[in-house]
Image (spheres, rainbow, N blue to C red):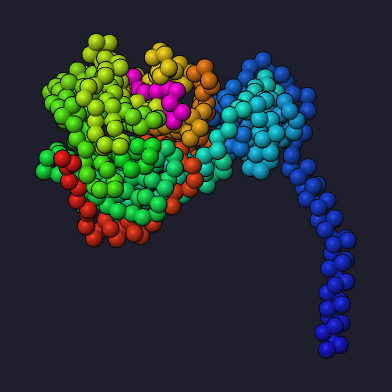
Amino acid sequence: MKILDIHKHRGTEAQRFFSLFLIPWCLCALVLQFLSCSSRVEKPTLADVLPDIYPDYIGVTVPAGIAPLNFNFADETIDVMDVVVKGSKGAELHVQGDYADFDIDDWHQLTEQNQGGTLTVTVCVEKDGRWTQYKDFTISVSSYPLDDWGLTYRRIKPGYEVGGDIGIYQRDIHRFDEYAILTESAVPGRCFNCHTANRTHPDRITLQMRGEGGGTMIQKDGHQKWVETKTDITKAAGSYSYWHPAGDYVAMAVNSVHQSFFTGTGQRIEVYHRFSDVEVLDTRSNELILSPLLQTEDLEIFPAFSADGQSIYYSSSKPCRVPAEYEKVKCSLCRIAFDAEKGAFGETVDTLLNGPATDKSYVLARPSYDGRWLMYCVSSRGNFPVSQDDADLWLMDLKTGECRELSEVNSPKSESFHNWSENSRWFVFSSKRDDGMYTKLYLASIDDQGRVSKPFLLPQRHPRQYYTEMMDAYNCPDFTKTKVELDAHEAYRQVFDNKREGVKVKE
């Protein structure tokens, strides 16, 4: 017993010695090591130009608490980059290395302290033993919060076929963590997309699976069910879905998707539909609600409920011989009333924007959840804007009906699928502006007057490495209020059990 006490006493003395002498010595050693590895910025040459960085975060507006805007210098042959970020309301960050790599917690503290203010960024670069200091640039920290947990999206290799582990993923936008929701490795040989949460809330979520054993998954309050939405009356299963705000109805398009490929031109692919109708599924009774106004020879596509749930926006185009006459596909933007209490469509269709009359195509209408704005895509033709280089985002003021191009976010390449944050102050969209091939995700804010900030690329911990080595395209992005919880094992069981709940057409 005494021996144990002696050993205990010796252990206590050793701990005291370590805490009094060794810990301070170790800390000093770490500081000296950091200083020896860091280069002092001495007598830099002042360059009267902004730094060339990737991603381009110069002049963007971000929400407080977003993941750090790490960036690389465009010239990959530099020796080291030194970056200082100062907040207009206090606090400062200083990093040095191969690229700007900010600590997540420090970045959060900096942006939260400077909400409604600006961050001034000073970039110095050492190359061949000489320092160059570039003009400062600013990043605005919006007074509008972005409280959504993250984004959901599909990642797919742009090879136009099933394979390569197609997957629905989610990303914590306040950090760098990405999680799989459902991937092809969980349900082999299946292709899926059109995942939709109810106004960012994943307690109501749906996704469609194509091909053999396909179906529509509807998850409500954690319970999955797989539904076969095709009937003897309807032409195909539902897709391109959108939830009613009350969470009982899902609007869907019924269509067939085809692809044609070009040779000897700058365009790679044209995506088109041979038919398309719009319907609504009552998820309580598994009944399809149809209207003769939405089951015509015209192609009705991309439905979206209004913020109050009293109408549905959708696009419609006249039939033509596709793919031969693909340039004649001009979609109009339309609206039809919907009575949620009766589960019935209205008797008339309003044409908000006439495609053939303006020689344009208007698709993918997405109303802000506060009911103020309607964002949509405009291109010269077609109903699949991700394949159109001239596809741009436009905004309609639902109070005045005034429309304008969102020149703040558009580029010479395709801007397509977009969705709103829960508070309607931020939106996410996909764009091919980076390389013309891969769609990547950009975020921007909007104020009360409809003014939109310069968009910023979804931050990554190692931005150049990530975006140059990733061979996936992002599509169908949406915000999610909280992390999506989906049981992939249950999805696998239900997919390969091949048991689907049937639906019937409401009389």
Residue 491 makes an appearance in the image: yes
Left or right, residue 271 beside residue 168: left
Image coordinates of residue 284 in percent, x first then y, are 29, 48
Q: Determine the residue located farthest toward the top in the rendered image.
A: 357
Quadrant occupied by the C terminus: top left
Asked which quadrant contains residue 140, the reply is top right
Q: Which residues are magenta?
A: 368-382
The verdict on residue 237 being magenta is no
The verdict on residue 378 being magenta is yes
Q: Nearer the viewer, residue 77 or 436?
A: 436
Residue drawn at x 83%, y 78% is 8
Image coordinates of residue 94 in percent, x first then y, are 72, 35
Image coordinates of residue 282 in percent, x first then y, are 27, 43
In the image, residue 115 above or below residue 162: above
Q: Determine the residue located farthest toward the front in the rendered image.
A: 341
Q: Nearer the viewer, residue 196 or 124?
A: 196
In the image, residue 332 above or below residue 19: above
Q: Nearer the viewer, residue 255 or 156?
A: 255
Asked which quadrant contains residue 80, the reply is top right
Q: Determine the residue located farthest toward the left in the rendered image.
A: 232
Image mark count: 0
Left or right, residue 117 beside residue 212: right
Residue drawn at x 35%, y 26% is 365
Residue drawn at x 86%, y 76% is 10
Quadrant occupied by the N terminus: bottom right
Image coordinates of residue 70 in percent, x first then y, are 59, 36
Q: Nearer the viewer, residue 507 or 416?
A: 507
In the image, residue 431 above or below residue 357: below
Asked which quadrant contains residue 506, the reply is top left
Q: Determine the residue located farthest toward the bottom in the rendered image.
A: 1
Residue 382 makes an appearance in the image: no
Residue drawn at x 81%, y 52% is 27
